[in-house]
Image (cartoon, rainbow, N blue to C red):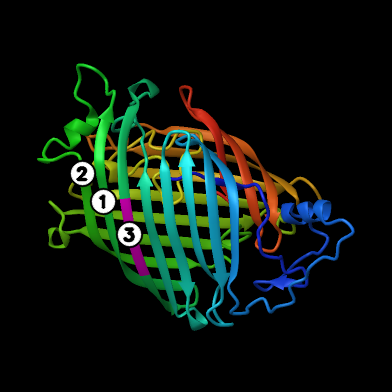
């Protein structure tokens, strides 16, 4: 439900050029990034500003940039993005606030407000995901046997209010609870197939009013994370499990339950290099009941719209989703400015009649990485993905896909 931004100017804050270490890892001052390259070109002969502040200062560092973006689901987009980063304590991980305003050529509006706050000694992690979305986009029906010709536009607006608080159990392990509120309204089909009942109409036929969809539920969360850098991990393991019971007691018309398991593994390969083998599995299951159609598991329906490179967002949809992906990340230039990736993935969705996984939709592709910031290891990611039966396109991200 989002687009991926490509910054076209550098951050408004000055990079800490005096810092030799970040997150316990040495920074090679001979490494180059896009921000440094732009600074070298635009400030030749000028005195370079140096931020000598402590890396874990409680000073709030604010960035605001205009940007351009692109995804298969949105086309080209204009974006104004801002973020703030700070430490609540020298013993805590970095905390962040992120917001943006996106308007696309398809008349879509995306307005997120995302925070990730860590308290002293990382005892608590408070996560906020609030979004307003106006997102006319294509839907293709249910299951894995649909074709691109089945697609038609479904228009809607949505409000998402997701709030979670996690408590450290032991090193790298957290558990907590949250509350998720999702409201879809002004839903309408635009030019659906003539003389036929669409999958959306069949699925929502039991509801008296189908111009809105609503879900409200508590969540139970477990996280294990041994990565040193979540933006671009070199090694480590990540596991996130979210159980969400949407009970009638929370205002739902009927009860339904879902489970999401997000697992990732990173291995340096070869061991003495900076190249990385990365693996991702994302299982999104409906344990009981019937979620609203727009909240069913779907391609690119994960929080950052990254599953299924090679296919447009929402290309497949069903009660259950199984997804796996592998990627090899390697350097191209010795100074770290350019890198590359090759990837392969596979997704499967259960069919409405049998509730079984009966098809697999593979995807594959390659891409270029441009180092935006060597301190955080943030890359601009430009990928081309291929799917079956004419699916494919360009996929853009800031930070690695997973």
Give the residue displayed 78% in from the left and 56% down from the top: 39
Q: Position of residue 91 (x, y in %)?
A: 56, 82
Is residue 402 visible to the viewer in this orientation of the structure? no
Give the residue displayed 52% in from the left and 79% down from the top: 88
Observer-nearest of 128 and 271: 128
* Disc 3 element: strand
Confirm or deny contact between disc 2 and disc 1 (CB under 8 A). yes
Q: Position of residue 367 (x, y in %)?
A: 64, 39
* Disc 1 element: strand
Confirm or deny contact between disc 2 and disc 3 (CB under 8 A). no
Cα distance in 3D space between marks 2 and 1: 7 Å
Q: Any mark on residue 84, and which?
A: none
The span picked out in magenta is 159-164
Figure quadrant of residue 168: bottom left
- Residue at the outermost front position: 46
Q: Any mark on residue 212, and which?
A: 2
Is residue 69 visible to the viewer in this orientation of the structure? yes
Observer-nearest of 369 and 323: 369
Mark 1 crowd level (few <14, some 14–19, many ≥20, 10 Å Cα): some
Mark 3 crowd level (few <14, some 14–19, many ≥20, 10 Å Cα): some
Q: In the rendered structure, which disc, 2 or 3, sits on the residue that comes first in sequence?
A: 3
Mark 2 crowd level (few <14, some 14–19, many ≥20, 10 Å Cα): some
Q: Position of residue 311 (x, y in %)?
A: 46, 33
Q: Is residue 386 left or right of residue 295?
A: right
Cα distance in 3D space between marks 1 and 3: 9 Å
Judging by the rendered image, the residue that carries numbered circle 3 is 161
Judging by the rendered image, the residue that carries numbered circle 1 is 183
Figure quadrant of residue 239: bottom left
């Amino acid at each position: 439900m989002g687009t991926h931004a490509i910054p076209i100017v550098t951050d408004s804050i000055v990079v800490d050029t005096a810092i030799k270490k970040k997150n316990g890892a040495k920074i090679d001052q001979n490494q180059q990034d896009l921000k440094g390259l732009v600074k070298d070109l635009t400030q030749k002969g000028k005195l370079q500003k140096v931020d000598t502040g402590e890396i874990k200062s409680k000073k709030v560092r604010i960035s605001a940039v205009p940007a351009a973006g692109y995804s298969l689901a949105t086309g080209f987009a204009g974006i104004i993005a801002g973020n703030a980063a700070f430490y609540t304590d020298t013993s805590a991980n970095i905390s962040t606030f992120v917001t943006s305003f996106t308007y696309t050529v398809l008349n879509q509006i995306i307005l997120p407000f995302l925070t990730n706050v860590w308290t002293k000694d990382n005892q608590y992690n408070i996560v906020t995901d609030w979004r307003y979305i106006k997102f006319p986009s294509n839907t293709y029906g249910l299951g894995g046997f649909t074709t691109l010709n089945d697609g038609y536009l479904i228009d809607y607006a949505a409000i998402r209010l997701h709030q979670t608080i996690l408590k450290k159990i032991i090193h790298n392990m957290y558990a907590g609870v949250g509350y998720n509120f999702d409201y879809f309204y002004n839903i309408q089909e635009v030019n659906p197939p003539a003389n036929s009942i669409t999958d959306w109409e069949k699925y929502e036929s039991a509801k008296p009013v189908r111009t809105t969809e609503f879900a409200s539920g508590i969540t139970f969360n477990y996280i294990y994370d041994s990565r040193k850098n979540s933006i671009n991990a070199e090694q480590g393991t990540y596991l996130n499990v979210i159980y969400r019971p949407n009970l009638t007691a929370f205002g739902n018309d009927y009860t339904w339950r879902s489970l999401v398991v997000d697992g990732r593994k990173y291995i340096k390969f070869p061991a003495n290099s900076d190249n990385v083998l990365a693996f991702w599995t994302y299982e999104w299951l409906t344990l009981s009941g019937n979620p609203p159609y727009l909240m069913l598991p779907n391609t690119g329906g994960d929080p950052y719209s990254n599953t299924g490179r090679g296919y447009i967002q929402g290309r497949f949809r069903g009660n259950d989703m199984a997804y796996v992906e592998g990627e090899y990340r390697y350097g191209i230039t010795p100074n770290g400015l350019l890198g590359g990736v090759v990837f392969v993935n596979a997704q499967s969705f259960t069919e409405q009649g049998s509730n079984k996984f009966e098809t697999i939709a593979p995807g594959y592709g390659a891409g270029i990485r441009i180092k935006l910031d060597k301190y955080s290891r943030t890359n601009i990611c430009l990928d081309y993905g291929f799917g079956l039966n004419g699916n494919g396109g360009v996929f853009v991200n800031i930070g690695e896909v997973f």
